[in-house]
Image (cartoon, helix red, strand yellow):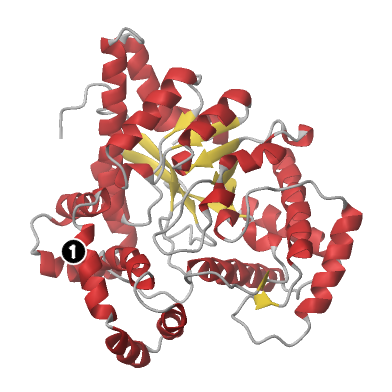
Amino acid sequence: MTALRYTDGIPAIDHHSHAGYVRPGQQVAGVGHYTLENALGHVEGHIPHAQYQDYMALVESGDEDGASALGDRLGIPGLIAQSELFQETTVHAVALKEGCEALYGPVAPESIDAVSRQARIDDPVGLYDRALLLSGTAGVLTDIPEIDSEAWPHERYKPIGRIDPYLFPFGHPAWTGRGTDAPRFRRIFFRVLQRQLEIAGTALPGTLEGYKDFVISSLERRKAEGFVGLKIASAYVRSLEFVRTDVQTARRAWSALQAEADQPFDGREAEAALNPAAHKELADHLAFFIAEWAVAAELPMQIHTGFGHTEPGLRISTANPLLLEGLLGDPALNTLQVILIHGGFPYSSNLTALAQMNGNVHLDFSWMPYLHHHAVGRVLEEWLELLPANRVMFGTDTGSPEVHVASTRRARLALDGVLDSGVTDGLWTPRQATWLAERVLHRNLCDVYGLEL
């Protein structure tokens, strides 16, 4: 990589990470897990739908023998190997290799998964701390259901809480689409809600009013425990179009869903024979209710926009950030500090317009540094040329220390290239370019969240 002129030595703060997060039921895995996860889309696209569902059900249940036997009959090991070969030319594969080399030095490719897995077992926090040190990162905001603040000190690891589990108290209508990624997100949301109810020492309240009291109490407790912001990841399970819904409509939806959820239903965990219209109405009402609380609590809110994982599930058209115009344009939420994350790819210019039109909207380019090379530079050019200096934030969107190191280096390289080009073209002075580097890498985040790291 070329030498850095403007970003070198400026500390970064990762606006969006998953440090310290292990999915419910997931065992510790090495870096091979990321390549395998990316291979699932290839597998899903080459075997019959019903058989893929059967295979993933065995995988997710922990039935290794059953999954292996069915996988062999379906030729899944060969499909995974094929996908891994094809992935070698992606920026993701390059970034993973760069991060491994930075953390572990020269390791034979066939050993790197075991080496990285053992490093996580031996000292997961120390490994991530080293990644922060190597990348010049002062701290991270981590999207996580719970975090041990003694193991992961809040001086460096500041948690963000998803509001999605609160939006779906009765689960979801039956999933009929491709893939298993969206149902996995549904289960995660469901389990997080059950955990929050358990912590509160209560069952699901019987009325909408009682439930809303629980939601606020739970959010206030999490804020007191150190959560510094909120997040909406609902694009993985529903449209980003949130519509303000009055309390009478929400009560009717609550009653309908409550009755339907009590009926026997032979479906996945977190699914029931629910009316989709009522399901959306209740979630919409709760989203605005929580957003108004966030305004009063002065907690910023991240929102996932744009595409998702390689396995089908998230619908890209319903993850278009323009669908958020109703939420962003609501007068009661005009001071809610919203950060639209991931660069919104392939809707990056839509994000630019939303931020230009709404002074409380900010953008981050997390995820992009380890998925793109040229595109991240083009997005930063557009954002920094049009938007005020306080509107763009750096992030990685990874729970992998290896990817964190590579993503931060690649983000610095892309940002530095844009700044250098701008200075050459007379857009900015060298002093302004250095100031912009500081704004993007950490100062904008500190101002929005009221933090000093």
Q: Residue drawn at (28%, 64%), measured in percent from left and top?
A: 35
Q: Which residue is mark 1?
A: 85
Q: Residues within 10 Å of mark 1 (few under 14, many from 20)?
A: few
Q: Identify the image quadrant of residue 369.
A: top left
Depth check: give the residue in front, 14 or 284.
284
Depth check: give the residue in front, 259 or 318.
318
158 displayed left or right of 398: right
Please state the horizontal and vertical placement of residue 428, each as a whole percent of the image.
Answer: 35, 10
Indicate whether 52 appears above or below 244: below
Indicate whether 180 appears above or below 88: below
Please state the horizontal and vertical placement of residue 96, each as a whole percent of the image.
Answer: 23, 54
332 displayed left or right of 108: right
The amino acid type, in three-letter code, at marker 1 is Leu
Q: Residue drawn at (29%, 12%), measured in percent from left and top?
A: 423
Indicate whether 1 appears above or below 104: above
Query: Count of labels shown?
Result: 1
Is residue 209 among the parts visible in the rendering?
Answer: no
Q: Residue drawn at (18%, 54%), measured in percent from left and top?
A: 97
Please state the horizontal and vertical placement of residue 435, each as a whole percent of the image.
Answer: 38, 18
Residue found at the very far right of the displayed protein: 248
Position of the C terminus by quadrant: top left
Question: Quick one: SS at disc 1?
Answer: helix
Indicate whether 193 appears above or below 273: above
Position of the N terminus by quadrant: top left
Q: Residue drawn at (57%, 41%), measured in percent from left and top?
A: 321
Q: Identify the image quadrant of residue 332.
A: top right
Depth check: give the residue in front, 136 or 402.
402
